[in-house]
Image (cartoon, rainbow, N blue to C red):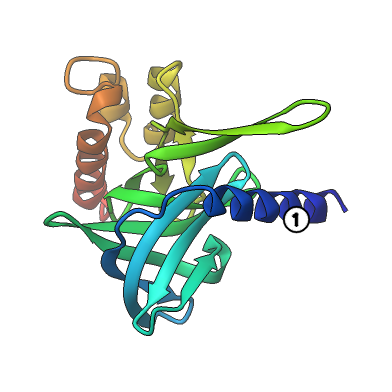
Amino acid sequence: MKKVFTLALFLGLSGLLMANSPLPDPGKGYIVTKNGKSLTGAIGNIFHTSYGSEVTFINDFGTIYQIHPFLIKGFVFQDNKNMVTYESKYSERKWLFLKVLHKGKHLSVYKSPEKKSVVNFTRVSFMAETVKNDVYWVELHGKNPTQIKRMGFKKQMRKILKRRAPELAEQIGSKGYRFKNLTAIAEAYNKKCEETKFKL
């Protein structure tokens, strides 16, 4: 019952907040369905809260949809001259759209949407605001994404890397292997795994 209430609350709040938020200029792109098909159109708002994510998709006929990450594999759109990719991920008991920063065979790096909607409740009303979001995730192959935090980064990353790349794990925290170097660390981990995959 609690899960149903949480989902209903999230959907209700997302609809309310999107209705009161200006729709940005949609970026030309497409969504990828569960069976791998691409549906072209445009991507509008990427709505993100502590309860999960939704995206606004406008198909080629102009019909607007609000899509939950459970329903699709992800989406791609053009931002200026760059193509931006988001994938649907499940972590910490919720579905999220996460931006792909590095896609690797063994370790990938993602980032939460740039903006996050926060709802503050009082006894008689609630207030919604949008704040900057700067949350990163890593995903080992076959596992759900793990949120990576600045506080405790060294300990957390060493634990993730030490099984397949103990030497790399020991370098975490030194120059070039800090929180700001997360993508480079993932690239080094993938390279190390490829070099050692045939060793017993």
Closer-to-camera residue (122/157): 122
Residue 189 visible in the current orientation: yes
At mark 1, the secondary structure is: helix
Comparing 43 with 182, the one in front is 43
In the displayed structure, does residue 159 sit left or right of residue 94?
A: left
Q: Is residue 117 left or right of residue 134?
A: right
Q: Residue furthest right?
A: 1
For image coordinates 24% across by 38% down, the residue present is: 183
* In the image, farthest residue toward the left: 81
Residue 71: horizontal and vertical position, in percent? 55, 70
Residue 200 in view, yes or no: no
In the rendered image, the quadrant that contains the N terminus is bottom right
Q: Locate residue 4: give its quadrant.
A: bottom right
Q: Check disc 1 and give the amino acid type.
A: Ala
For the point 38% across and 31% down, the residue is 134
Left or right: 129 in relation to 187: right
Query: Mark 1 highlights which residue?
Result: 8
Identify the residue at image location x=56%, y=42%.
49
- Name the residue: 31% across, 62% down: 26
Q: Quadrant of residue 58?
A: bottom left
